[in-house]
Amino acid sequence: MPSKGCAVALAGVGAYAAAQAFVAPAAPQVQEQREVRQLRQQAAVSATSTTSATAALALGAAGIAAAAAQAGKRTQRRCQVVRQATAVAEKTFTKMPASVKPGVVTGQALVDLLNYAKEKGFAIPGVNVVSSSSINACMEAAKKAGGPIMVTFSRGGGQFIAGKAADNTDDAACIAGTVAGALHVRQVAKLYGVPVILHTDHCQKAWLPWFDGLMEANEEYFEKNGEPLFSSHMLDLSEEPLEDNIAICKKYCERMAKVDLLLEMELGVTGGEEDGVDNSDVDSSRLYTQPEEVWQVYETLSAVPNGRFTVAAAFGNVHGVYAPGNVDLQPVILHNTQKFIKEKLGTDEDKPVSFVFHGGSGSSLEDIRYAIEAGVIKMNIDTDTQWAFWDGMNSYQKKNKDYLQAQIGNPEGPEKPNKKYYDPRMSLRSGEEVMADRLVKCMEDLKCIDVL
């Protein structure tokens, strides 16, 4: 029978071991067995002498105190992180629907946000991104403007994020880069305190393997988190016969509905060229969608249980860069379409369709805002923001040219280092700042200012 001293020593050493286990992860099984043997040896020695037991008790108590103090510090740090994350998650907006929170918005919250935009008469800018810098510029602009933002990945943009040297067999790099970009947005979006719509751009029929890969990522993410990785995806099957376009969109809308994703589909053709989609030689008649075509889409996709969709109807919009006055935009088509579908539905709702606006370069502010009045809830902003990012970097280079000619040596002296000037973060940050400022101006044009 072990003495009281031995029992106390065992309790002390055991408590110390337990405290250590709380602070650090458990060791492998072999290490655990070695520690048990050591504890038993210590207990056996303590049983032969009350003095030894008392000493062991003292050491055990000291160990407990030290371990508890260390654990307390770690607990405080963990609690601080939890409190910060909880504070961001619990932040609410005074003007937005209650379902809309900072960070990536999906499902019903996304629908509520888009309906709110249509009701209040503003459109959300959709910006194609190709790096963490352009992603950050988008969310920085939204934070400055006090409005939501749509961060958009194209197929080519996804491949660029993965790396142009990455194996792209079966669109592997396009898929991996797009998913990686989405996960980056997921990690940082809440820190900007704004609603973020996570979207992908044009996907034509030949690119459906990319779309399918993204759907698999959404379904896996939904299974683990109860919501999709992305907020929405776009299918651009406008080059296909109308019946095929609608049938394929319906098929994907049914799949997307199961994981609370919204589908953006395109009708008619947006002219010009963008990121591998070239419609510069298309017949001009296809640049203008007819109300009957939109109704066929609305009727079909509305019948999908839990189906959510927006329509990119062509009304003369053209991708690319054009001087004002060179684009024959006809937003009246959208107004007429809303009236047509309202009559078909026999509803009191004036704008049953949520439209999106592609190819706005060269459009007048008057036409843009008239389109918003017709139910446009998102407008793609690409060429202006891409130029702004480059312009910011180029301006930085011009301003600091004399410090960017060599690693050492500048106007201040032949041995003066230039590292702080050629650090890539310096020019990239200049690009971010100018892009964010340009995007804020775009948000002003779209009336997407102070709407949170």
Image (tube, grey):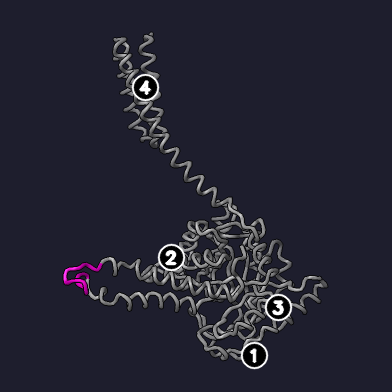
Q: Quadrant of residue 28?
A: top left
Nearest to N terminus: mark 4 or mark 3 = 4
Residue position marked by numbered label 4 in the rendering: 61
Residue position marked by numbered label 1 in the rendering: 285
Is 416 within the magenta?
yes
Q: Residues within 10 Å of mark 1 (few under 14, many from 20)?
A: few
Task: Please identify the quadrant where the N terminus is shown.
Answer: top left
Is 393 placed above or below 116 here?
Answer: below
Is 379 within the magenta?
no
Q: Residue at x 52, y 66 (%)?
A: 144
Q: Calculate the distance from the C-alpha at mark 2 to the C-alpha at mark 1.
A: 39 Å
Q: Which mark is residue 122?
A: none
Label 1 sits on a secondary structure element that is helix
Q: Are marks 2 and 1 in contact (CB under 8 Å)?
A: no
Task: Please identify the quadrant where the C terminus is shown.
Answer: bottom right
The answer to whether one can see residue 218 in this image is no
Q: Residue furthest right?
A: 346
| Residue type marked 3 | Val
Give the magenta-colored segment's residue range.
407-418
| Residue type marked 1 | Ser
Is 47 placed above or below 17 here?
Answer: above
Q: Calculate the distance from the C-alpha at mark 4 to the C-alpha at mark 3.
A: 77 Å
Nearest to N terminus: mark 2 or mark 1 = 2
